């Protein structure tokens, strides 16, 4: 768990931490990885990974429009909108 | 002798039917107790809406009589979306979030006539076992205010235990119904994965999350489940099975006691579970020792699967569509990173980064796929065991309620994995998607102890029937804190 890996994880997770928070997090992650490394002693050769606890499969529904998107209602909870558009900082100069 | 504060739903229904109380009177009494409570078990109280709904319920009772949950006050864990009512998940990220729709559980319970008094406190995004990870502050255990109520459904558990509501909704990903139910001396049911719709339940780990009820008795849990369960076309993982049946009580059930579950357990808690097993023997059931050999790997596999799913689910919080948004971002990356870093608490960040690690290139097979393989082995252990037994009995928790601050420090310097071990008895059934409940079975050092019963998939009837028979034979569920 070195500084480069922490940087990479934070970039992937879109998180940014202060130096002290980062150090604590690194210590925490070392302990968490130690906990989850307990798995490595188990023999799982030939065992199929389990995605769904009841081996469920994605059910399909008829290909019909059943729901209308009520843009105004959903955008009431958005931090910044204008003319029905979500606002973000300028991406293209 | 019954203290009205600790009335069960069954008691309340009787009182409403005999007109010795009204829905409005009940709502007022409970709202008054909530207002005077210092447990911090509620994030939001909905007094006006509750009283308006109670007035409607009284009209309906006058017209048609009481049925279902009509007029019964309840609370929802603040993870269930309530249209027009703030739903925070106890996070700064959603502190001002007002959902545009209701969770299916909220709709169903409203349709059954239940009166929602408010939204209960919890660990942020349901991540925690002590309710100390809440943006709105910790919840106190009604049995001892210096101690935690457990988590993540700590607010629901404390509110029921303190008589602020007779029942509350909760959710369980790795033990978040059963562990706080045990630490607060109440009854809590995690149904089979898919029994209760997840629509409108803010997602933590989608292959594990399951909503369920908390109440004072198994009988009340059954009634609540009837009004929460059912196939929901809005949740593609909701099971298309019929309602939980009510079959005749059976004697001669074989109750498995897994030998792997005794380790790290306070001996006095172990003794209460032994005594419970003896009660079951006295009721005509048989105790059988069983082995669930992969139990030792369950906690590790759970934290990988749950964190991986959490890191994916929580990527939706970007400061753009809803939730917390940072001030004056320099660019788009700055908007995402600062909104998320300000909006999430320390434990949520740890889980996101753990999940990101387990899913990243070079670690995916060693962690995520490995955990899913172990998940199958943990489930296989249970299914093999259920070929020869009917139910499994275990402790719910390794200890009684612990002191606030014992496992979480404000400066985040404590080892987080010590808290993770609190779920050691509850995560295996979660990984396997099995129904499980916790009911009170003893008192140690003036604090309640819970036992866990686990059934095969969709075996809620058997689970509840056995719990009901235990509660007819004992009075642990009637013990209440001195308030």
Image: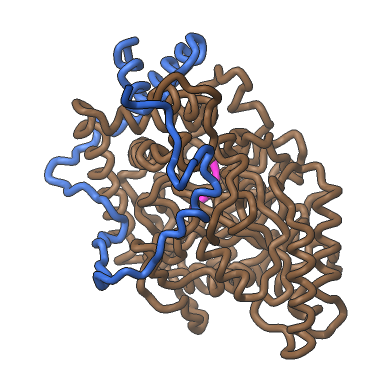
Q: Which chain is blue?
A: A
Q: Main secondary structure of the magenta part?
A: loop
Q: Which chain is brown?
A: B
Query: In this picture, is B342 found above or below B293?
Result: above
Tell whether position A28 is magenta.
no
Q: Residue furthest bottom?
A: B64
Question: Left or right: B5 with respect to B383?
Answer: right
Q: Which residue is at a point 34% across and 38% down the rendered structure image?
A: B308
Question: Left or right: B175 with respect to B408?
Answer: left
Q: Which residue is at a point 24% across and 70% down the rendered structure image?
A: A63
Q: Quadrant of the C terminus of chain A?
A: top left
Q: Quadrant of the N terminus of chain A?
A: top left
Q: Front-most of B44 and B336?
A: B336
Q: Residue furthest left?
A: A46
Q: Position of residue B454 (x, y in %)?
A: 45, 60
Question: Left or right: A36 with respect to B334?
Answer: left
Q: Is residue B187 visible?
A: no
Q: Is residue B260 visible?
A: yes
Q: Which residue is at a point 44% across and 15% down the rendered structure image?
A: A27
For the magenta stretch, what is the residue range?
Answer: B394-398
Quarter location, residue A12: top left
Q: Position of residue B70 (x, y in %)?
A: 69, 77
For the rendered model, the colour scheme is by chain
Q: Front-most of B379 and B369?
A: B369
């Amino acid at each position: 768990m070195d500084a480069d890996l922490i940087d990479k994880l934070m970039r992937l997770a879109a998180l940014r931490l202060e130096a002290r928070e980062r150090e604590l997090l690194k210590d925490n992650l070392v302990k968490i990885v130690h906990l989850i490394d307990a798995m490595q002693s188990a023999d799982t050769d030939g065992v199929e990974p389990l995605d769904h606890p009841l081996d469920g499969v994605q059910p399909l529904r008829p290909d019909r429009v059943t729901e209308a998107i009520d843009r105004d209602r959903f955008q009431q909870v958005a931090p910044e909108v204008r003319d029905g558009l979500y606002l973000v900082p300028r991406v293209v100069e | 002798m019954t203290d009205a504060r600790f009335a069960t739903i069954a008691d309340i229904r009787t009182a409403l039917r005999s007109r010795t109380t009204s829905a409005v009177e009940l709502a007022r009494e409970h709202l008054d107790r909530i207002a005077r409570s210092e447990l911090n078990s509620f994030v939001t109280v909905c007094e006006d809406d509750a009283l308006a709904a109670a007035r409607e319920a009284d009209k309906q009772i006058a017209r048609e009589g009481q049925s279902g949950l009509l007029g019964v006050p309840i609370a929802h864990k603040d993870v269930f979306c309530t249209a027009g009512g703030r739903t925070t998940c106890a996070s700064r990220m959603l502190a001002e979030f007002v959902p545009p729709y209701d969770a299916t559980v909220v709709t169903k319970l409203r349709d059954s006539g239940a009166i929602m008094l408010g939204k209960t406190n919890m660990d942020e995004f349901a991540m925690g076992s002590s309710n100390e990870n809440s943006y709105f502050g910790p919840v106190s255990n009604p049995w001892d205010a210096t101690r935690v109520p457990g988590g993540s459904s700590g607010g629901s558990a404390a509110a029921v235990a303190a008589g602020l509501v007779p029942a509350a909704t909760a959710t369980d990903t790795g033990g978040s119904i059963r562990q706080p139910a045990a630490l607060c001396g109440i009854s809590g049911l995690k149904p089979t994965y898919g029994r209760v719709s997840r629509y409108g339940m803010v997602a933590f780990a989608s292959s594990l999350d399951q909503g369920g009820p908390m109440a004072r008795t198994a009988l009340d849990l059954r009634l609540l489940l009837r009004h929460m369960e059912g196939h929901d076309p809005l949740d593609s993982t909701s099971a298309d099975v019929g309602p939980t049946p009510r079959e005749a009580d059976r004697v001669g059930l074989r109750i498995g006691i897994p030998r792997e579950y005794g380790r790290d357990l306070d001996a006095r808690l172990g003794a209460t579970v032994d005594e419970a097993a003896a009660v079951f023997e006295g009721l005509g059931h048989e105790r059988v020792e069983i082995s669930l050999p992969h139990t030792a790997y369950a906690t590790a596999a759970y934290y990988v699967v749950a964190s991986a799913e959490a890191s994916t689910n929580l990527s939706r919080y970007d400061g753009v569509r809803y939730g917390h948004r940072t001030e004056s971002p320099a660019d788009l990356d700055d908007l995402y990173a600062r909104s998320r870093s300000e909006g999430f608490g320390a434990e949520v960040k740890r889980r996101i980064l753990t999940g990101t690690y387990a899913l990243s290139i070079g670690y995916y097979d060693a962690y995520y796929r490995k955990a899913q393989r172990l998940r199958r082995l943990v489930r296989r252990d249970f299914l093999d065991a259920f070929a020869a037994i009917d139910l499994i009995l275990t402790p719910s928790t390794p200890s009684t309620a612990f002191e606030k601050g014992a496992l979480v420090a404000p400066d985040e310097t404590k080892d987080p994995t010590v808290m993770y071990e609190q779920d050691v008895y509850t995560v295996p059934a979660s990984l396997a998607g099995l129904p499980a409940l916790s009911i009170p079975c003893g008192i140690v050092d003036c604090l309640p102890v819970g036992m866990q019963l686990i059934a095969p998939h969709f075996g809620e009837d058997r689970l509840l029937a056995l719990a009901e028979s235990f509660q007819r034979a004992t009075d642990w569920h009637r013990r209440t804190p001195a308030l």
